[in-house]
Amino acid sequence: MNKLYIGNVSEEASAEDLETIFEQWKIPHSGPFLIKTGYAFVDCPDEKIAMMAIDILSGKVELHGKLIEVEHSVPKRQRSCKLQIRNIPPHLQWEVLDGMLAQYGTVENCEQVNTDTDTAVVNVRYGAKDQARQAMEKLNGFLMENFALKVSYIPDETAAAAAPTLGGGKRGFVPRGPLRSGSPGLGARPKLQSDVPLRILVPTQFVGAIIGKEGATIRNVTKQTHSKIDIHRKENAGAAEKPITVHSTPEGCSNACRTIMEIMQKEALDTKFTEEIPLKILAHNNFVGRLIGKEGRNLKKIEVDTETKITISPLQDLTLYNPERTITVKGSIEACSRAEEEVMKKVRESYENDVAAMNLQSNLIPGLNLNALGLFPGGAPGMGPSMGHNAPPPGAQGGYSSFGSSYFGGEGPFWASVLSASSQPLSGQPESETVHLFIPALAVGALIGKQGQHIKQLSRYAGASIKVAPPDGMDAKQRMVIIAGPPEAQFKAQGRIFGKLKEENFFGPKEEVKLEAHIKVPSFAAGRVIGKGGKTVNELQNLTSAEVVVPRDQTPDENDQVIVKITGHFYASQLAQRKIQEILSHVRRQQQPKPSPRGEGPPRGEGPPRGEGPPRGEGLARPSRK
C-alpha cells in the first residue's frame, strides 16, 4: 500500500505545489505527482512512509484554500472487505473497539499493526464488501476521545492479479519471469525461526552501546547468534526503555539475550552506572497466566531453580496498544539467562498448546473460524511473521489467520456454517437458545466488573442476555451464568467467559478451562439425546471430548423439560452443544404437522415417538459428577 491518493486538490494546484508540501514535511516520494482535476496520485518508497504521509497531511495541510485529503490509493476492483483504521486512541479498550466495529457487520478479523505512531492502528476484515464500505463511510473522520479516525481500504491483491490487463493486453496474459518473493502465487514463506520471538526491554541509555558504531555491535550479535534483531528506537519517544525483538530459534534467542545483557553490563561499568539492570521480558498476556501457574507455583519454581527474583506487571497496565506484560528478572547475568530460557519455554509451550487445540477443533467443526474466541495472541508489536499469516489451519474451510485478535478481544473470523446449520427453525432465522454456564463463585466479580461494566460490554458485544444467578447458599462454590441468545451470541459470550477465567488465573497453567453447561431439552426428546443403550451420548462424547450426561430419574420442570449436562473445555463444549441442538432441531421437524392433501388437520397420533418419554435409567457412558 505505497501508492497514495490525494483528494480535495484545488484546480490551481500543480505537481510542484504538492512536491513542495512533501519536502516541507520531510516525506519522501519515489515518483512524480500525477495531477488530475481535483485529485492526484503519488508513490511512496514503502508502506510506513505512506502511512506517515496520511497521518501528517490528511485534513491538516491547506493548499490554495483547500484542506487536502490523503489516503491509500485502491482501485475499485481491489476494494475488498479489509480496512485499515488509524489514529485510534492508544488507551482504548478492545471491548469498546469491538462494539464500535460490530455496528456495521460481522468482523471476521481484527489485528493490531506495529507502527511508530503514538496512536494505534488496526487492520479489520468484514464479512462482506458492503459492510466494509459502510464502516469506511461512517468511521472515517469519526471522533473518539478527540482523535479523528482515519480509515482506508486494504487492497485485495488477488483481485488485482485476476483482473484483465489494461491497455489492450491479451486475456490470460502471464508476465515473463519468476514470481517475486511477495507474490500471492508463492504461498506462505517458509518458517526459519520460532513462532514466538523474544521481546525484551532495555534502558534507553544503553541502546547506543547495543547498536555500536555504525551498527557494528548489533551486526556481530546478529551474526554470532544467527538471529534477526530489531531495536525499536522510535517506539515510545522519550521513554526510559526501548523494546528489542529477537527472531531466531529458542537457542538463538537465548544467546542473543545473554550477549545483550553482557553489553549492557560492560557499558554500565564504563559509564559508572550504579543502578541494577534487571532483565525485562515482554510476553503477550495470553500466556502469562500459565507462566505464573496455580497459586504462582510455576513462577516460584523458576525463581528457585534459577536463583532469581521475578515480578510481573499488573493487568491494569494492559491497553489496546499494549497487550504485553513485563516480566522483570533480577539476578546475575548467568541466573537471568537461565530464567529467560525457562520463562520463554513456558510461553512457547502455551502457544503451541493453543495452536494444537485450535487445529484439532478446526478439524472437528468444519468451517469454524476460531478467532472469534479471543483466546489467541494478537498482532502485538514484534510478534513473529507466522503469527499473522493468512493460511487457514488444517480443516478450517475458509478460515483466516489463527491469530490477529486481542486476548480478550475480538475479533474474528466468525463461526461458520456449524453455528447456523443446526439451529435454523422453519422461518430460516436462528432461534434464541438458553444455556446455563457454571463458573467458580470467586470469579463472579471479575466477570461482572466494576459497577457491572464488564458484563454489560460483553452482553453488547455478543448480542446476548447474560445474567449471574443468585448463589444457591452461603457456601456455594459455583455460580450459574444464564446466557440467552442465538448460536453466534452463545459462541461469542461463552468464548469470552472461558477466556476471562483463563486470563484471571482461575485455572492452573496445565489444566484447561473446563466448565459445566446445562441445556434444557423437552422430556420427550431426552431419549434421542441418549440413544438406544446410550449409543448417541457415547458417540457425542467420543466426537467432542466433552462429558455429556442426562442425569437419571429427573423430574421434568413446569415446561416439561429435563437437563442435559455438558462438561469440557470451550471447543468441546461448543461442539457438544451444537450437536445436541441439531438433534433437537431434527426432533422438532418431525413434530411439525404434515400437510394433508385434503387440507385436513394433522394426522392422528402425531406426537412424541413411542418409547421416547423421560429417560428411565438408560445406560450412560459416565456417571454425573454431581
Image (cartoon, rainbow, N blue to C red):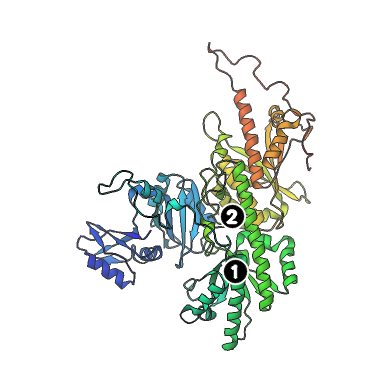
Residue 157 drawn at (x, y percent)? 39, 51
In the image, 366: left or right of 13?
Answer: right
Above-or-below relation of 176 to 234 = above
Residue ID for mark 2 = 376
Q: Is residue 514 visible?
A: yes
Give the quadrant of residue 435.
Answer: top right
Q: Residue at x 77, y 33 (%)?
A: 554
Q: Residue at x 72, y 71 (%)?
A: 303
Q: Residues within 10 Å of mark 1 (few under 14, many from 20)?
A: many
- Helix, strand or loop under label 1: helix
Residue 32 drawn at (x, y percent)? 26, 64
Give the quadrant of residue 299.
Answer: bottom right
Q: Earlier in the sequence, mark 2 or mark 1?
A: 1
Q: Quadrant of the C terminus?
A: top right
Q: Residue type at mark 2?
A: Phe
Q: Nearer the viewer, mark 2 or mark 1?
A: 1
Q: Residue type at mark 1?
A: Cys
In the image, 109: left or right of 490?
Answer: left
- Helix, strand or loop under label 2: loop
What is the spatial separation of the Cα atoms under label 2 and label 1, in whole angstroms?
A: 22 Å
Residue ID for mark 1 = 253
Q: Nearer the viewer, residue 237 or 299?
A: 299
